[in-house]
Image (cartoon, helix red, strand yellow):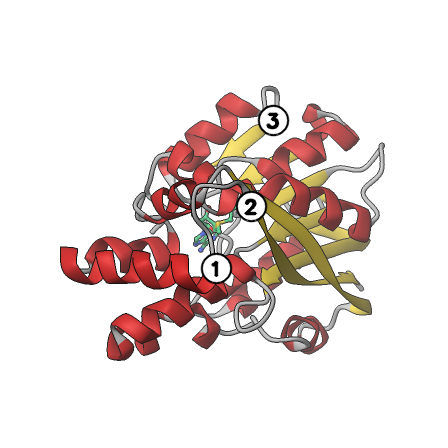
Amino acid sequence: MFEVHAEAYDRFVGRYSPQLAAALCDFAGIENGRRALDVGAGPGALTAELSKRVGAANVVAVEPSEPFAHACRARVPGVEVVEAGAEAIPLPNDAFDATLSQLVLNFLPDARPALREMARVTRAGGVIAACVWDYSGEMEMLRAFWDSAHEVSPESAAQHDEATMRLGREGELAQLWQDSGLLRIRSTPLRVRGRYGNFEDLWASFLGGVGPAGAFTVSLPQDDQAALCAALARRLGAGEEPFELSARAWAVAGTVP
Ligand SMILES: C[S@@+](CC[C@H](N)C(=O)[O-])C[C@H]1O[C@@H](n2cnc3c(N)ncnc32)[C@H](O)[C@@H]1O
């Protein structure tokens, strides 16, 4: 799902990532003078925001997908990008003042080992913050997509709908933070907007095969793909004109004891 070209990701969820990164950094209180880690960096939207705020030399990114790690290196010069997963971060203890992860934890089979690693590499008193889309509610693009998919291919959509993933509901991230022993836990919704030149611009973004929605789209037979395209256009009332969709993510931050 994420072994894809960075440009395909940019057209898809990457369209929302820079705005979301700025909102997550504001929420986590990322200021100059901090050493910061981005876990599951993708092609580097949050890495770039961190680098802007604290300087490239103070930022490290961890990302398991080779094409994304490569893109992140190219896009955010001076940042160390390590090809690794969140469950085994090959970095020393207490190396960071802040460890952030944007739109990643819901994809892990179990986020607890990842959070333990994030806490290990963050100094006592440092902050750990993350966010996950509100898949079942106000992430308009993905919600409209899956609602349309249920019309066209109900059984398969029920299996793959991202609303069924863990950590996508209000309060779930905060519960994970609490269970992991983090302190001073704060939660907030983050809202951003995605801009599209026309409906074709949105539809093409699914054909890159990125993430569960993209993978679902490209797995469909041609007839079902066409039906999904029509159902989504109808649902959004979108055509030749530019339009925007809003997206909400649930964010949490806590302090390492
Ligand atoms: C939706 S993308 C988010 C990318 C980026 N953080 C952003 O906001 O644009 C999910 C990312 O999680 C990464 N990922 C998947 N499994 C991971 C794991 N076990 N550890 C760390 N990252 C992982 C994927 O490769 C992908 O880059």
Give the residue at mark 1: 236
Q: CA distance from mark 1 to mark 3?
A: 39 Å
Q: Nearer the viewer, residue 64 or 154?
A: 154
> Which residue is rendered at x = 49% and y = 47% of the image?
13
Left or right placement of residue 149 versus residue 92 in this view: left
Left or right of 51? Residue 155 is: left
Marker disc for residue 224: none
Q: Residue at x 37, y 36 (%)?
A: 66
Classify 175 as above or below 182: below
First in residue order: circle 1 vs circle 3: 3
Q: Amino acid at mark 3?
A: Val
In terms of depth relative to the viewer, which is nearer, 21 or 84?
Answer: 21
Residue 179 vs residue 29: left or right?
left
The amino acid beneath tag 1 is Leu
Asked if labels 1 and 2 touch by Cβ distance under 8 angstroms, the answer is yes
Residues tagged 1 and 3 counted as in contact (Cβ below 8 A): no
> Residue 72 appears at what percent x and percent y?
51, 30
Quarter that holds the C terminus = bottom right
**On screen, residue 190 above or below 185:** above
Q: Residue at x 55, y 69 (%)?
A: 112
Residue 243 is labelled as 2
Q: Position of residue 246 (x, y in %)?
A: 62, 55
Residue 79: mark: 3
Q: Amino acid at mark 2?
A: Phe
- Label 3 to label 2, Cα distance in Å? 35 Å
| Residue 83 x, y percent position in the rendering | 44, 38
Of badges 3 and 2, the one in the foreground is 2
